[in-house]
Image: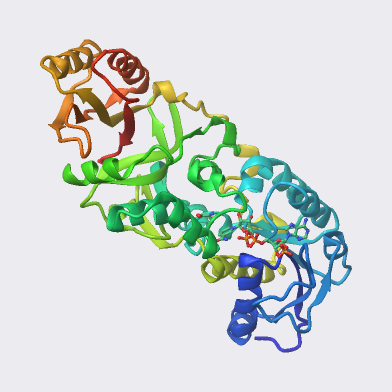
Amino acid sequence: MSSELAPVNIGLLGLGTVGGGTLTVLRRNAHLIASRAGRRLQVTIATARDVSKPRECDTSGVMLVADPFAVVDAPDVDIIAELIGGIEPARTLILRAISNGKHVVTANKALIALHGNEIFAAAQAKGVMVAFEAAVAGGIPVIKVMREALAGNAVQWLAGIINGTCNFILSAMSEAGSDFAEVLAEAQRLGYAEADPSFDIDGIDAAHKLTILASLAFGIPLQFDNVYVEGIRHVSGEDVTYAERLGYRIKHLGIARQAADGLELRAHPTLIPAQQPIARVNGVMNAVLVRGDAAGPVLLSGAGAGAEPTASSVVADLVDVVRALTTDRENRVPHLAFQPGTLAALPVLPIEAVETACYLRLQAADEPGVLADVTRILADFGISIEAIIQLEHPDDPAVVPVVILTHRVRERAMNEAIARIQNLPAIKAPIVRIRMEPFA
Ligand code: NDP
Ligand code: HSE
């Protein structure tokens, strides 16, 4: 380390789970981090909604200000770490920091997914860096791997467990048969969930992260609106049990795939074979499986949320920015892996055009001919069955749960078949459909 170089000054927006964790890691590992970055990194100024609130992190020596604009306008600050979350005022603060010539590090996937194109263009024009490793999969260095380590590959598809809260809930349902609301409250207590936890359980957070990964993989502009989104509210303990009996686990996945006629971008619960390594990624752990034409399948896993795992990624970005401060702007790694002028508008498929296998759970009256009617409808739509089991209803002997696994089928045909089956008088409850991915 060159001891003559002045320290780099950081302004921290937010002192919550991630902001507090970042301050703690920067202090605890200050010497190590300075040795790696070549300069000392010091947080000189920070803001929060309530600056008088007692904090777990040590804020000594940091000027605490109530006005976040005082942080982005501070003349001696070199890098802004935006760890507030949400769209506003985070977007305005980041754009102001950029226009003030400051580099930015953020963990805000919602903001990058929705406004990243605007933010990156502003950063490009001003010649400053915007880094966002912590925005996808917490402590896993997936952005760096996608952008740099896999730069020689044509990515064929990627699939990731990219929401820690959903994985925490689905794992607890599978391991302990726990109650959904109780597990969600525990995820909130541990700091995993978003400020509005419906972002997690309705799949929106995973879709934000998938938006970012898809751009890095396929060289397309960020386009959250084209992602098909489904959450985990409709997945019951019964579905988890039936899937396991059939040799599968249910995971909430973000999937991006280059199909023959366009790109699939989707985030939804998915049955995956239990013997796949990604199926054994449980709790708050995340994993991203990327298939490159040259590297083949690459699996990255680690903690997907929480104070210090996320801080690990924020600090890695801070170190990257400090290192790059001496590099000319043309030689910096582009935000979305591809040079801005080469981003292409590839067609994204509507969900109706996507092909997947499916798990269907029906609640049918226990009477002759029902299974024959169901299988006839599936056959009418050209849907072939991989497995079918009829079970006992835990509470009602007059109703039989029927679980069907299909082979791959176009979503449009499956929708029509489900609608026809749902109309049979013998079907007593809404049909549950969960898509399946064999990763073959
Ligand atoms: P928290 O709610 O724990 O912290 C947010 C912080 O921002 C708090 O200190 C809050 O102040 C402050 N804040 C909120 N609004 C304002 C405002 N208008 N002006 C000034 N300060 C404000 O959130 P997290 O730390 O969990 O999340 C921060 C970001 O990191 C989000 O974008 C999130 O999506 C992302 N992220 C979170 C992960 C996690 O595991 N929690 C993992 C990966 C990314 P106060 O403390 O006074 O309320
Ligand atoms: N709420 C997010 C999750 C935080 O549960 O994955 C990490 O991005």
Residue at screen point 48% across, 53% down:
146
Residue 298 is at least partly visible in this image: no
Does residue 284 lie above or below 227 as drawn?
Answer: below
Q: Quadrant of residue 358?
A: top left
Instruction: Specify the farthest residue to the bottom.
Output: 3
Indicate left or right for 388 with 76 as reference.
Answer: left
29 or 65: nearer the viewer:
65
Residue 49 is at least partly visible in this image: yes
Q: Quadrant of residue 397?
A: top left
324 or 83: nearer the viewer:
83
* Residue 278 in picture, x, y percent from top left: 31, 54
Instruction: Specify the farthest residue to the top.
Output: 380
Image quadrant in which the C terminus is located: top left
Residue at screen point 18% across, 26% down:
398
* Residue 186 in picture, x, y percent from top left: 47, 61
* Residue 342 in picture, x, y percent from top left: 60, 38
* Residue 285 in picture, x, y percent from top left: 41, 61
Does residue 157 lie above or below 352 as drawn?
Answer: below
Q: Count the marks.
A: 0
Indicate left or right for 131 with 405 as reference.
Answer: right
- Ligand 1's quadrant is bottom right
Does residue 178 lie above or below 238 as drawn?
Answer: below
Indicate left or right for 214 with 93 as reference.
Answer: left
